[in-house]
Image: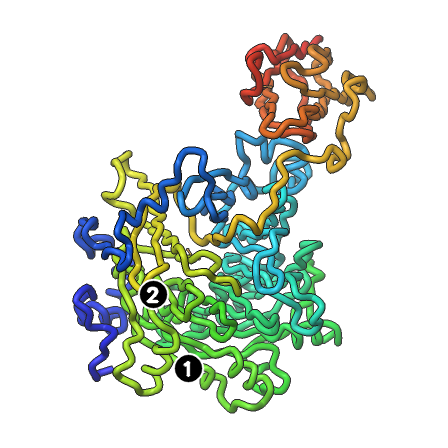
């Protein structure tokens, strides 16, 4: 682009030379991805004043004591393996929902119930104790969240976890077969065929790393491939997979249910970064869901290794005829990062990462290609415009504007999609860039209130800044990340608040609080082992297997003592009989490495071998009552 571009000449924009250096110097670009000192570490003056706000706009995030947030936020925890619940606009963290990693507060990964969800080895120990969550997305109905479920990925061990949004607990985890580096995840928004199914029934999962299929110690990387997987939203079983060329990174879905998309940064199928960035363009792959499922029905699939999951052929060479293609590959510039679906249902937007651009792909044109009405699928690209350095992810305000993070520029750029299309079509005066905001620093994910729903409301934006540098008190070498909240209700973005978060969240969503109806007390019937009557409490023995049933009712456990023999395998079942909201008890046993909680009307169990003689005070670890400290009993392990 040699012509004058009104969108890249703002005073606040970095020098044009720096804008283009990624395109020019591939290796220097990679060094730049880690460069964190590109901006002076000053900031306060960068937020422009809101046009209409007479008072301090950041007052919006300072809720009065007792005041509730208006949005729920679901955040990925990164390699803490949990999902976090935040209140927005305050940014207060309300809960961490353990999924892939054991949790000492709740007893996740220690109780038998949670271990069964997480998965165990034959000896009963957990198969995995680590995780790396990146993306959280929730179930849809009629294009908006319906409050049933949220899903989150574990990139390390290719697992998908489901969280029930009534109790805010993980209830299922599925491991994807033959996938390494499960990264992007997105639920469908309706069925592609049946109009009565206007809600989520599938969750799509992108495989980022290519491997030999089935896995084998093969050095020849030309034999490696990646899979795109579809998981059933209810059963959590893997329905089918698609064998593809290149890899999958992020995933997005169309509002009409017909297509899923994944951006691909490694169409080169390289094994080293130099190879992965050798091509000028990579792609965004579109999956035609109805055709894929028809192919599975027609038996046109194979299976891989021990897996029974049907795998259909999405390789480029097998999908050149649009009339039968299961997938289509749209070319996009060098190593794109996110792909996001605009809330008007019209566009998919790929951020360039190593290209300073965003690519706008029109959904109806992709469908036209599948229908034989468009000769070249790349003609579905309706804009490819320059935004700034290191574009990663895009959010929407529901008023035609997109907000894209610029990792290297440490900025959020607000741009108008229609004007970007006009500019792309030759209107050089179209000022598609509306505003730029400095953020602190190196932003990755971004999302706006209700962004990827039909109800995008354009109120708040949250930006996940990967580096916080000087924004918080120094606490040694490990820095918090900085989640910033931005007011996007006006023309100009207004930075409202910084929030330190434990590393490292990636993606998140936030939506109106009315969409959830959380339950604060369990129903005892949800637990097959529930000790429903305090009269059942006590010890029963079958050989060396001992069951100890305990009930908690503030301020006492029942029984208050029990005896077992050394060497017994003890299963301790605890039911909380308190019915009052917020009345949680814990049960810890010293020297036995046991601690877990039971919320009101909840039942949980643990199994251990009583291998140490003596008196062990089991005690309540969760402050529940004035006599909380007195809430304890004796386990006596006899010879
Ligand atoms: Cu969603 Cu962080 Cu995994 Cu971009 S990725 S930042
Ligand atoms: Cu029960 Cu503390
Ligand atoms: Ca590439």
Is residue 289 visible in the rendered image? The answer is yes
Name the residue located 37 percent from the left edge and 52 percent from the top edge.
464
Residue at image mark 1: 382
Name the side, left or right, on which 97 lies relative to 392. right
Q: Secondary structure at mark 2?
A: strand
Q: Is mark 1 within 8 Å of ligand 3?
A: no
Quarter of the view holding residue 188: bottom right
Counting residues from the N terminus, which is met first, the one under dot 2 or under dot 1?
Answer: 1
Name the side, left or right, on which 546 lies relative to 20. right
> What is the quadrant of the N terminus in the image?
bottom left
Name the residue located 42 percent from the left edge and 40 percent from the top edge.
92
Nearer to us of marks 2 and 1 is: 1
3D distance between C-alphas at marks 2 and 1: 18 Å
Q: Is residue 138 above or below residue 335?
A: above
| Mark 1 Cα-neighbour bin, 10 Å: few <14, some 14–19, many ≥20 | many
Residue at image mark 2: 391
Identify which residue, 42 or 491, lies in the foreground: 491
Q: Secondary structure at mark 1?
A: strand
Q: Quadrant of ligand 3?
A: bottom left
Identify which residue, 97 or 435, lies in the foreground: 435
Q: Is residue 28 above or below residue 288?
A: above
Q: Is mark 2 within 8 Å of ligand 1?
A: no
């Amino acid at each position: 682009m040699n012509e004058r571009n009104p969108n890249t000449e703002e005073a606040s924009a970095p020098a044009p030379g720096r804008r283009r250096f990624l395109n020019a110097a591939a290796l220097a670009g990679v060094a730049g991805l880690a460069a964190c000192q590109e901006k002076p570490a000053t900031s306060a003056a960068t937020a422009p004043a809101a046009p209409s706000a007479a008072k301090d706009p950041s007052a919006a995030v300072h809720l009065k004591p007792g005041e509730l947030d208006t949005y729920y936020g679901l955040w990925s925890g990164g390699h803490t393996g949990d999902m976090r619940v935040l209140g927005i606009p305050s940014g207060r963290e309300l809960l961490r929902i353990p999924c892939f990693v054991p949790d000492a507060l709740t007893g996740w990964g220690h109780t038998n119930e949670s271990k069964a969800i997480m998965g165990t080895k034959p000896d009963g120990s957990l198969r995995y104790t680590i995780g790396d969550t990146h993306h959280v997305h929730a179930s849809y109905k009629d294009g908006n969240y319906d409050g049933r479920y949220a899903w989150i990925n574990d990139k390390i061990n290719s697992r998908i976890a489901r969280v029930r949004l009534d109790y805010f607990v993980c209830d299922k985890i599925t491991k994807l077969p033959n996938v390494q580096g499960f990264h992007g995840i997105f639920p469908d928004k309706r069925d592609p065929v049946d109009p009565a199914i206007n809600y989520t029934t599938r969750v799509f999962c992108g495989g980022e790393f290519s491997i030999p299929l089935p896995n084998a110690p093969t050095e020849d990387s030309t034999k490696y491939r990646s899979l795109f997987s579809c998981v059933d939203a209810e059963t959590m079983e893997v329905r089918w997979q698609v064998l593809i060329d290149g890899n999958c990174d992020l995933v997005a879905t169309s509002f009409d249910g017909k297509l899923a998309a994944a951006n691909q940064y490694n169409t080169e199928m390289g094994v080293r970064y130099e190879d992965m960035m050798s091509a000028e363009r990579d792609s965004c792959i579109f999956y035609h869901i109805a055709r894929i499922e028809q192919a599975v029905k027609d038996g046109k699939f194979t299976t891989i290794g021990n897996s029974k999951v049907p795998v259909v052929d999405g390789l480029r060479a097998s999908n050149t005829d649009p009339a039968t293609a299961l997938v289509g590959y749209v070319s996009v510039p060098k190593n794109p990062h996110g792909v996001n679906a605009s809330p008007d249902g019209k566009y998919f937007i790929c951020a360039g990462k190593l290209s300073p651009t965003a690519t706008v792909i029109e959904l109806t044109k992709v469908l036209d290609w599948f229908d034989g009405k468009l000769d070249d699928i790349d003609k579905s690209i309706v804009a490819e415009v320059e935004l700034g350095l290191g574009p990663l992810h895009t959010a929407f305000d529901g008023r035609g504007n997109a907000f894209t993070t610029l990792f290297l520029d440490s900025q959020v750029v607000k741009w108008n999609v229609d004007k970007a299309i006009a500019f792309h079509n030759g209107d050089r005066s179209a000022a598609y860039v509306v505003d730029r905001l400095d953020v602190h620093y190196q932003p990755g994910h971004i999302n706006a209130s209700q962004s990827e729903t039909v109800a995008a409301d354009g109120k708040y934006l949250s930006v996940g800044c990967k580096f916080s540098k000087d924004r918080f008190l120094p606490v040694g070498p490990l820095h918090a990340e900085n989640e910033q909240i931005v007011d996007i209700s006006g023309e100009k973005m207004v930075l409202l608040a910084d929030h330190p978060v434990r590393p490292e969240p990636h993606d998140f969503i936030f939506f109106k609080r009315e969409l959830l109806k959380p339950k604060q007390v369990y129903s005892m019937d949800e637990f097959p082992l529930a000790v429903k009557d305090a009269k059942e409490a006590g010890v029963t023995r079958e050989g060396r297997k001992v069951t100890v049933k305990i009930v908690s009712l503030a301020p006492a456990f029942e029984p208050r003592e029990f005896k077992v023999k050394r060497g017994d395998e003890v299963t301790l079942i605890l039911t909380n009989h308190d019915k009052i909201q917020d009345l949680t008890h814990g049960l810890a046993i010293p020297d036995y490495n046991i601690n877990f909680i039971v919320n009101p009307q909840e039942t949980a169990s643990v199994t251990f071998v009583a291998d140490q003689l003596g008196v062990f005070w089991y005690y309540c670890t969760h402050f529940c009552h004035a006599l909380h400290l007195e809430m304890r009993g004796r386990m006596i392990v006899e010879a």
